[in-house]
Image (cartoon, helix red, strand yellow):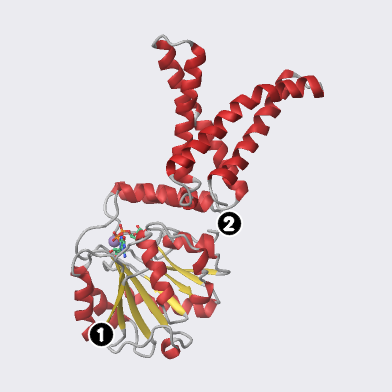
Amino acid sequence: SHDHTESTTPVPDLRTAELAEPGAVTIVVPTFNESANIRRLLHQITESVPARLPCEVVFVDDSTDDTPEVVRDAAKDCPYPVTVIHREEPVGGLGGAVVEGIKAAGSDWIVVMDGDCQHPPSLVPELVATGERSGAGLVVASRYIKGGSRAGLAGSYRVAVSRGATWLTKSLFPRRLHGISDPMSGFFAIRRSAVTADVLKPLGYKILLELAVRSRPRRVSEVPFVFQDRFAGESKSSAQEGLRFLRHLAGLRTASPAARMVGFGLIGLTGFLPNLLGLYALTAAGLHYVPAEILANQLGVAWNFVLIEHLLFRDRRSHRRWWDRAGRFALLANADLVLRIPLIALFVHRFGMGALSATALALVTTFVLRFAGTEALVYLP
Ligand code: GDD
Ligand code: MN
């Protein structure tokens, strides 16, 4: 969804066969205000990628500075075609930019790397060669295998965060990330044929994770690399990017209805906290416990609504206004409460169940009904 494409040097139509011979590579570089790094990066690429390896470089740029102009100028000294896709609407952040670049790529192999010289371009030929040799669809440049290191990860805080995120992610996707020691890496080679572009929902920095989980390349190889220091400028990552990462994880983990139901249940459990706190505060303020419970319940409902909106149904919200969704959700949640008592009575008197098992069954029944109702009546399937 870029508004205009700026082209430089002798640029072939990227989608024609000119570059798409076996072994040809498209280097995709996402950039956000990296003008001070571009010249050095292109120079390093020129030094590293032998002329016999057909190569093109695609920058996908969301900058507010003069990065596109700098690329255009630096490209004059580059033997390969260099293209800038400047996005006026930077959907999906870094990951969205990379997917846009992958779609524009004309080669069998795509190498994704950062624009700040933290990823050594000298590894580009090796990544592709490893893939060709092993038949892998994805070759990850890893900091966590022998010969690799995260030298350029500044500060023990960032190292700890990176370690925790890697551990969490690997535990959430043990099968999909089998054989990938560094799912957080932003440096990798992927075969065009292994990319299923239409199922991708990139959100922020972890595009390798997105590809590994949703495109599921059949075989994966790894090559060690040393994460360098950033050349100029500062990391564009932020606390907000951290939150985006958590939403990305939730979206990936709840792709199936069964997983979504588990998420729905877990979020529902956390709703007891505001519910009980509200009940405590309202009765302490002198309210009778029945209206207090009714009001406090709405607090739990609101809490649950906010969480499922952001974690479970993020990409299915658009067909109703938010207050429409909130109203329907609240209606379902309260219907659940109202339904529970007659349901328990039914189970006890009609089916002769004990009070405890009848209550448990009623809870499960209303839970499943509420989940199905939320899927069908609040969010688009
Ligand atoms: N187009 C676009 N849009 N590019 C972006 C955006 C965006 O919103 N945000 C960042 N970039 C570009 C930067 O300009 C840079 O070229 C590259 O993406 C990496 O961004 P940095 O801000 O330098 O990331 P980092 O160094 O903190 O993190 C890198 O290393 C991590 C591992 O520690 C990235 O490669 C991460 O993906 C990786 O997990
Ligand atoms: Mn960086």
Q: Position of residue 182 (x, y in %)?
A: 44, 59
The residue that disc 1 covers is: 78
Q: Is residue 186 visible?
A: no
Q: Residues within 10 Å of mark 2 (few under 14, many from 20)?
A: few
For this rendering, which residue is in front, 359 or 89? 89
Q: What residue is shown at x 46% (from left), y 21% (from top)?
A: 295
Is label 2 in contact with label 1 (beta carbons under 8 Å)?
no
Assess mark 2: CB under 8 A from ligand 1? no
Percent x, y of residue 258: 62, 47
Q: CA distance from mark 2 to mark 1?
A: 41 Å
Residue type at tag 2:
Arg
Residue marked by disc 2: 175
Q: Residues within 10 Å of mark 1 (few under 14, many from 20)?
A: some
Q: Position of residue 250 (x, y in %)?
A: 48, 48
Q: Is residue 83 visible?
A: yes
Left or right side of 357 for 298:
left
Q: Quadrant of ligand 1?
A: bottom left
Q: Is mark 1 within 8 Å of ligand 1?
A: no
Which element is circle 2 on? loop
Q: Where, quadrant-wise, is the N terminus in this rendering?
A: bottom left
Percent x, y of residue 370? 60, 37
Give the left or right position of residue 253, taking residue 287 as reference. right
Please tell me which residue is depicted at 38% across the width and 59% down the height of the picture.
92
Image height of 133 relative to 31, above or below:
below
Element class at badge 1:
loop
- Is 374 rendered above or below residue 116? above
In the image: residue 336, left or right of residue 154: right
Camera-nearest label, 2 or 1: 1
Q: The disc labelled 1 sits on which kind of residue?
A: Cys
